[in-house]
Image: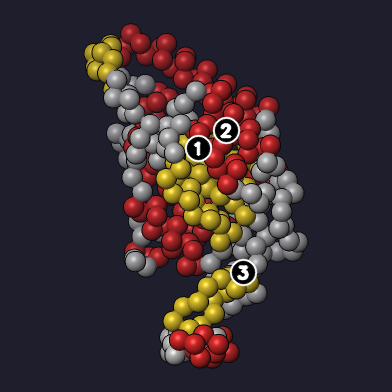
Amino acid sequence: MPTLAQTKYFDPRLFAKISSLELIARSVVEGMMTGRHKSPFHGFSVEFSEYRKYSPGDDLKYIDWKVVAKSDKIYVKQFEAETNLRATILLDASASMGYGEKGLTKIEYASYCAAALSYLMIRQMDAVGLVAFDKDVRTFISPKNSAQHLRRILVELDTLETGEETNISHSFHALAERIRRRGLIIVFSDFLDDPERIMSGLAHFRHKRHEVILFHVIDPDEEDFPFLEFLEFEDAETLERLPAHGRQIGPRYREAFNAFVQDLNRRCAENGIEYIPLRTDRPVELALLQYLGKRSKMG
């Protein structure tokens, strides 16, 4: 397995820029503790996590002598920090997230954001998990809060590829029943699905008393529609093709897209869900710094 620094989405410059900020829950969730966060990256804390093989230099007081007696092998107990908050990042890995004609694709942009927020959550002694989905749940990593866990998340992001078409409602209903402990649900998606189905899935999380943050990942082409010539447009998920003249359909397309965004924003507000649009032509660090700064001021 690669080291933390060898993973694609390990960005020390980005991590350093957001490290002074916090991502806190606005609503009361299970497991909340009071007081300032402390870094879990140095030493042991109080919650047992797993065993690992002894390495020269490990503190002898953490050797499990019962395991030594049974197996004749030396293992050390590993611990992870107590958790203030449990967050689960839901990352859309459907085919449409692979779009990106200039710069980062939507899934790459979302993955950089997910990596940075995972780092921030673990640094502030909170637990974070990762879910990848398209029409089904493809990856489920339960929330934990150790440096080893951050590496696991970043390795998973490294190997994640876009898959099939989207079924947000199906995936979210399944996840709402699976994520039993109340916490923070952070969604990264382009939300190219039926609005009613989207909100049905998100409302299930709210019914389970999770706090939900929705990051709408948008490629500039989807919003600006810069196409002026006659082209054949292909749906990334159904592969359906539609020949059309960009200059002729552009105004109607932009009007429909803006209406879709406004409708999604309105529905989120009505359901107590925070909605944040993310254009992939904006530097990740600027987008996250602005959001985290604004959220901390709003309390």
Give 257 or 131, whichever is nearer the viewer. 131
Q: Which mark is residue 54?
A: none
Q: What is the CA distance from the residue labelled 1 to the residue labelled 2? A: 8 Å
Question: What is the count of numbered marks?
Answer: 3
Q: In screen coordinates, is 54 left or right of 201?
A: left
- 207 relative to 129, above or below: above
Residue 128 location, quadrant: bottom right
Of mark 1 and mark 2, the one earlier in the sequence is 1
Q: Residue at x 53, y 67 (%)?
A: 146
Query: Helix, strand or loop at disc 2?
Result: helix
**SS assignment at label 3:** loop
> CA separation, marks 3 and 1?
30 Å
Where 139 sits versus 106, above or below? below
Which disc, if any, is residue 171?
1
Question: CB of mark 1 within 8 Å of CB of mark 2?
Answer: yes
Q: Position of residue 22 (x, y in %)?
A: 62, 55
Q: Are marks 3 and 2 in contact (CB under 8 Å)?
A: no
Q: Is residue 19 visible?
A: no
Q: Which mark is residue 201?
A: 2
How crowded is the residue under tag 1: few (<14 C-alpha within 10 Å), some, or many (20+)? some
Judge by depth and name the residue closer to the eye, 25 or 103: 25
- Specify the quadrant of the image occupied by residue 95: top left
What x and y, as percent, mark residue 183?
65, 49
Q: In percent of the image, x 61 and y 69: which residue is there?
A: 81
Give the number of the disc on residue 81.
3
- From the viewer's perspective, is the residue at label 3 or at label 2 nearer? 2
